[in-house]
Image: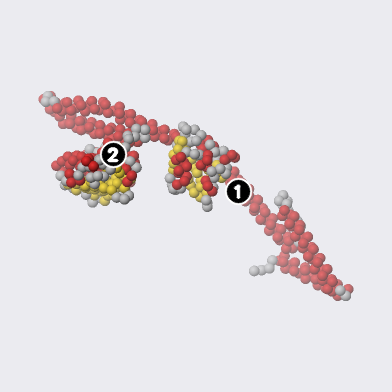
Amino acid sequence: MTVPRSWLALWRRLALIFLSAALLGRIAGQPLLALLIAALGCLAWQLWRLYRLYRWLQDEGEIEPPRAGLVWADIAARMVRLRRQNRKRKRKLSRLLEQFQQATAALPDAAVVLGDDDRVLWCNGASQQLLGLAPGRDVGLPVTHLVRHPSFVAFLGQQRQGDSVEFPSPVDDGLLLNARIVPYGKKQRLLLAADISRVRRLEQMRRDFVANASHELRTPLTVIVGYLETLLDSDDPALASWRQPLRVMRQQAGRMLHILEDLLMLARLESQKERPPRKPVAVPALLADIAEDAIALSGEQGHRISLSAEPRLWILGCEKELRSAFSNLAFNAVRYTPAGGRIDMRWFADADGIYLAVEDDGEGIAPQHIPRLTERFYRVNRDRSRGSGGTGLGLSIVKHVLNNHGGQLRITSELGVGSVFVCEFPGELRVEPPVALARNESGFR
Ligand code: ADP
């Protein structure tokens, strides 16, 4: 490390002062006194410089440093540079802060910074319109004192990342909000709330439209099917050449009716208003019926269909919905398994829940299709599905039925090996059947 030039100059100067003092002291016969006076003089001078620098540092407004000698000039120059950099940084930060505040003020979503105990540290303008928070008034208060909806309070307490909650705005019941929490920093969390009333209204409009259109189409279509059946049943020789086209028309009209029925079923499943009350459902008996229907559907294809069901395993639910979901799975297994294939249905419970597993050794499904199977009209092979009477809505119905029962659908499959569709229900749905009514498991082959 090299010694700065100002320091060398200072030492040179001090050496000169002390040498001169020693020389003068010697001439005057008082060398020690002369050295002492010189040392005190130097000390006083340096203290004066230090004092001026201190005053200058205290005075934020003054830019130019005091005139100072040697080392002090260096220190002052360095400080001037630091001061300038500091001012520049401050200006940049305040510009950024201003831009950030303008951006968050323009944000249509509410943004609230929460600190310890979920106290409001900061909030933007939209949080006033959506959550009723006033930046000046509510800072420092726990957000749960200001937004008291039970779903929101429970959501804030559970701290599960990635989740969101929907609740009506405390300012206006007509506004539906969707809130998310993003943790950041050490203990801070950002609460973001967006108005989703429009999206929900549009979804409702879409649901109503599909339900109404399906409903309106069903009646004329039923009439057409009725007439086609009458024509097919007729012995009139004039119709002989029309028999084949009439059969195709009857078949296609039947398919359309089937699609309409499934669309109406989905609309009912999605509607939160028309939820049927949950009642004890004798699932083993229900599955026995479905297995009989599956055998009938298989017909000459001779699938080996087996059912094993815990006889006393009943659940609370909607029988109509469960019948629809379970038959969709059983009939799919028949439709997508080659003749003579094996189909096993198992109804059982363990410590974690209650399950229906429908397993087949059929054609299987490639992994890229599996996550999309429950989408409406999603089919791996459109022609194959249509050819076997599919509507493309079956698994979507299954998913909705399970959702409505607090359950979920798990699908595992391998191409060419087979598939397993498992309906999982929460264990709390289990109910004890009346003793006399529980059907015996050995009743089905
Ligand atoms: P679809 O009426 O077309 O059967 P679904 O919603 O019931 O409609 O099923 C969606 C798609 O999932 C089907 O088109 C089919 O490709 C596939 N799939 C369903 N069940 C099975 C199964 N057991 N084995 C193989 N593929 C299946």
How far apart are the alpha carbons under marks 2 and 1? 65 Å
**In terms of depth relative to the viewer, which is nearer, 2 or 267?**
267
Q: Residue at x 22, y 41 (%)?
A: 436
Please indicate, yes or no, whether residue 263 appears anywhere in the rendered image: no
Q: x%, y% of residue 289?
A: 20, 40
**In terms of depth relative to the viewer, which is nearer, 311 or 45?**
311
* First reached walking from the N terminus: tag 2 or tag 1: 1
CB at mark 2 closer than 8 A to ligand 1? Answer: no
Q: x%, y% of residue 146?
A: 53, 39
Circle 1 SS class: helix
User: How many marks are shown on the rendered structure?
Assistant: 2
Q: Residue at x 28, y 28 (%)?
A: 217
Q: Residue at x 59, y 45 (%)?
A: 97
Q: x%, y% of residue 274?
A: 34, 32
Amino acid at the residue labelled 1: Leu
Q: Which residue is mark 1?
A: 93
Q: Is residue 387 left or right of residue 403?
A: left
**In terms of depth relative to the viewer, which is nearer, 404 or 311?**
311
Instruction: Answer with the quarter of the image where residue 230 lies.
Output: top left
Amino acid at the residue labelled 2: Pro
Q: x%, y% of residue 176?
A: 45, 35
Q: Residue at x 32, y 34 (%)?
A: 276
Q: Is residue 67 left or right of residue 302?
A: right
Q: Which residue is mark 2?
A: 280
Q: Which mark is residue 5?
A: none
CB at mark 1 closer than 8 A to ligand 1? Answer: no
Circle 2 SS class: strand
Please tell me how crowded label 2 is: few (under 14), some (14-19), or many (20+) other residues with Cα within 10 Å. some
